Image (cartoon, grey):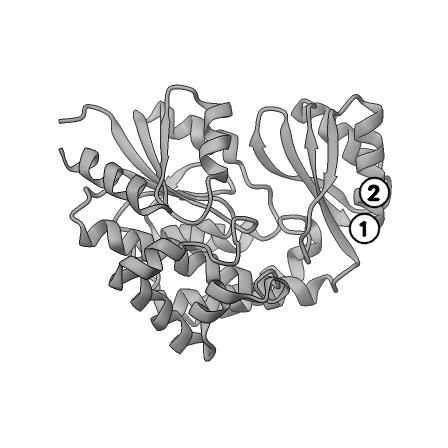
Amino acid sequence: MTDHKRAFLFPGQGSQAVGMLGDMIANADVVRDTFGEAGEALGYDLLDLVSNGPEDSLNATERTQPAILTASVALWRLWQHKGGPVPDYLAGHSLGEYSALVAAGVLKFADAVRLVEKRGQLMQSAVPAGEGGMAAIIGLTDEQVLEACAAAGTDVCEAVNFNAPGQVVIAGSKAGVDKGMAAAKELGAKRALPLAVSAPSHCVLMKPAAESLAAELASIDLQPAQIPIVQNVDARAYTEVAILRTNLVEQLYRPVQWVQTVQNLAAEGVGEAFECGPGKVLAGLVKRIERSMTVSPLEQPSAFEDAVNAARN
């Protein structure tokens, strides 16, 4: 028996790749069926897109979001199918919060797939492609990144993802992010890397999208969370529908407090976490935030089997 608590962590945009979960799709009916269910909800063959591309289509925000959500929920369902224990907490990075909501029973899967497709469309229409930007700033303190953002003056540039110590993402208008990157380099940043995204998430430019998302959410039936979800906007755990809903709307234009999320999970006694989705991005971030917490990525069949067997014992 384990004396520490467990959390499931769900990745966000940027973890997608053509061919992701290929071995899982080939070997597990539960995974294949989940992609089929998503395809029916969306009206196109999501399994074919994820398996075969083309990459530029998979990377379009309105396609990426359902693809990552579906991959994450497929692994969660497989975990349940194999008798994996129920975790004490759930958390998702940005888009990953929607995967957590499905896992917690807040959102029906088909509703969630259509909702994140709509979220992607709303984000893109709020800031047309090419007019916004995001960049990762490596090697500065949070305070220095905020100082770099301030150097953008009247152009929008905000710190939007506090991902790990010394790794903060900024977002805003293209001009604002360019100025923020230049200022970050002057302040001694090791790197300032533009990100290949088509919309600037979690900044004030997303407020119009958030208002439309609120209207979408109002028409969807939400249930209280069966497992507490640590939400991005304030890194606190919630189960109540009204709070979950409000925080989801605010999440579109407020920063992702990922460092605080991981620290708060550790403070609650979480010593073991599982990255439930494609890639290993969150495992890498957690290692830099909280060395006491182990994170097992679940995307490969052998790693999945090892994790679920160890967790059951």
Q: Amino acid at mark 1?
A: Lys
Q: Position of residue 71 (x, y in %)?
A: 40, 57
Q: CA distance from mark 1 to mark 2?
A: 6 Å
Residue 82 located left or right of residue 237 = left
State the mark number for residue 178.
2
Q: Residue at x 62, y 48 (%)?
A: 202
Residue 269 located left or right of residue 55 = left
Assess disc 2: are there few (<14), some (14-19) or many (≥20) residues with their C-alpha within 10 Å of its C-alpha: many
**Numbered disc 2: secondary structure:** helix
123 versus 134 height, above or below: below
Task: Tell me if residue 242 can be seen.
Answer: no
Name the image quarter holding residue 269. Answer: top left
Q: Residue at x 53, y 36 (%)?
A: 257
The answer to which of 118 and 207 lies nearer the viewer is 118
117 versus 252 height, above or below: below
Q: Are marks 1 and 2 in contact (CB under 8 Å)?
A: yes
The answer to which of 214 and 96 lies nearer the viewer is 96
Q: Position of residue 58 (x, y in %)?
A: 56, 63
Q: Quadrant of the N terminus?
A: top left
State the mark number for residue 31.
none
**Residue of label 1:** 174
The answer to which of 239 and 191 lies nearer the viewer is 191
Assess disc 1: are there few (<14), some (14-19) or many (≥20) residues with their C-alpha within 10 Å of its C-alpha: some
Task: Tell me if residue 291 can be seen.
Answer: yes
Q: Amino acid at mark 2?
A: Asp
